[in-house]
Image (tube, helix red, strand yellow):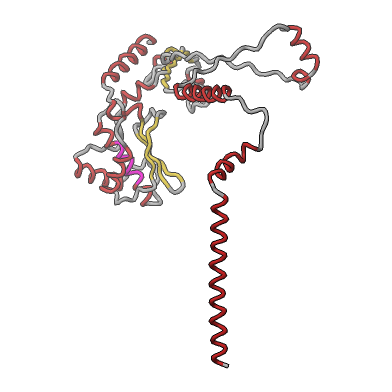
């Protein structure tokens, strides 16, 4: 029994691997949702969220209501083995649930949620699109393949239908008191479950070495006299390590060479030890030598005599006018 179940599970898994369709996961489900929302649901699903789920293994899609909005989730693990059309059909199936949640406040999933209103919308969409939306999804092989944790009972229930003592689960949760059938199993069978199969363990990445935590130290350990003396005794002749400098660029070397040349020029012309005032007046004296002082005096006397003659003439003219008037 044990070998048969393990062999069946492996063969089923290999078959599904050949059917894996990566194009389904590349579909933009949000853009599909917006198109179908306008086409079939009058744009009423604006408050609905659509997302992929990596944890769903029992059903291909689910829709549930929260406060004021709905959430649609699609299973990656199941739909990756199906066609793109089946993805569209699953999305539309869940959108019908979301539409009924938003339109009808009394709608609920307690009575399965696939009543007359659901079936009416389903048939209309199938007629318009040519799809084959159904009430229930048929993903039996995919669901079975995801249940990689298998337990087998060693009691008499191994020979009883429909499970033959097998418990298959997608998560590593062993059968126990939390299961609703546990008490009945104890009374009718009384056997114990043993794990016979689990998924292949992934190789764990090597962990990075943890950094050493610094111990609590006192200030005296860093700045105290004892610490300084100890370091001197340990390495008295130790020289500080020379840090390697980066090589200068071409522009920096050119600037340095120009500066060095200017410094050398200034060194070649030493400054004067004493300062003489005659150096300041030397240019003025050279100009004064060019001017003739006698010429200046003759010009000045000539101007003065001309002005005197003009004044005498003016005075005579004034006196004549005064006499005539008198």
Residue 54 in view of the camera: yes
Reply above or below: 147 against 311: above
- Considering every residue shown, the one lying at the far right of the view is 225
Q: Residue at x 29, y 38 (%)?
A: 135
**Which one is nearer the viewer's eye here, 274 or 30?**
274
Magenta stretch: give its range. Answer: 90-98
Residue 92 in view of the camera: no
Q: Residue at x 35, y 25 (%)?
A: 143
State the quadrant of the C terminus: bottom right
Q: Main secondary structure of the magenta part?
A: helix
Asked whether 93 falls inside the magenta stretch, the response is: yes
**Which one is nearer the viewer's eye here, 129 or 1?**
129
State the quadrant of the N terminus: top left
Asked whether 269 falls inside the magenta stretch, the response is: no
Reply above or below: 89 against 199: below
Left or right, residue 320 beside residue 98:
right
């Amino acid at each position: 029994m044990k070998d048969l179940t393990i062999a069946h599970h492996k063969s089923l898994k290999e078959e599904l691997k050949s059917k894996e369709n990566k194009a389904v996961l590349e579909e933009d489900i949000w853009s599909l949702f917006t198109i179908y929302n306008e086409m079939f649901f009058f744009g009423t699903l604006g408050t609905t969220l659509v997302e992929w789920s990596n944890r769903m293994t029992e059903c291909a899609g689910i829709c549930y209501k929260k406060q004021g909005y709905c959430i649609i989730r699609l299973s990656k693990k199941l739909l990756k083995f199906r066609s793109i059309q089946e993805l569209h059909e699953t999305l539309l199936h869940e959108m019908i649930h979301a539409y009924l949640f938003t339109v009808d406040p009394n709608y609920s999933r307690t009575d399965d949620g696939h009543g007359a209103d659901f079936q009416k919308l389903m048939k209309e969409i199938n007629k318009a699109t040519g799809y084959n939306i159904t009430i229930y999804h048929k993903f039996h092989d995919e669901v079975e393949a995801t249940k990689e944790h298998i337990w087998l009972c060693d009691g008499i229930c191994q020979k009883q239908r429909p499970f033959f003592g097998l418990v298959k689960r997608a998560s590593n949760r062993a059968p126990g008191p939390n299961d609703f059938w546990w008490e009945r199993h104890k009374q009718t069978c009384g056997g114990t479950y043993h794990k016979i199969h689990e998924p292949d363990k992934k190789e764990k990445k090597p962990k990075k070495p943890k950094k050493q935590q610094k111990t609590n130290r006192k200030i005296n350990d860093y700045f105290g006299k004892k610490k300084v003396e100890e370091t001197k005794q340990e390495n008295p002749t130790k020289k500080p390590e020379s840090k390697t400098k980066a090589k200068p660029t071409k522009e920096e070397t050119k600037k340095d060479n120009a500066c060095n040349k200017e410094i050398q020029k200034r060194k070649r012309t030493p400054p004067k030890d004493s300062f003489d005032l005659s150096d300041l007046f030397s240019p003025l004296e050279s100009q004064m030598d060019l001017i003739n002082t006698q010429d200046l005096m003759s010009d000045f006397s000539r101007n003065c005599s001309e002005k005197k003659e003009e004044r005498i003439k003016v005075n005579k003219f004034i006196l004549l006018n005064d006499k005539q008037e008198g």
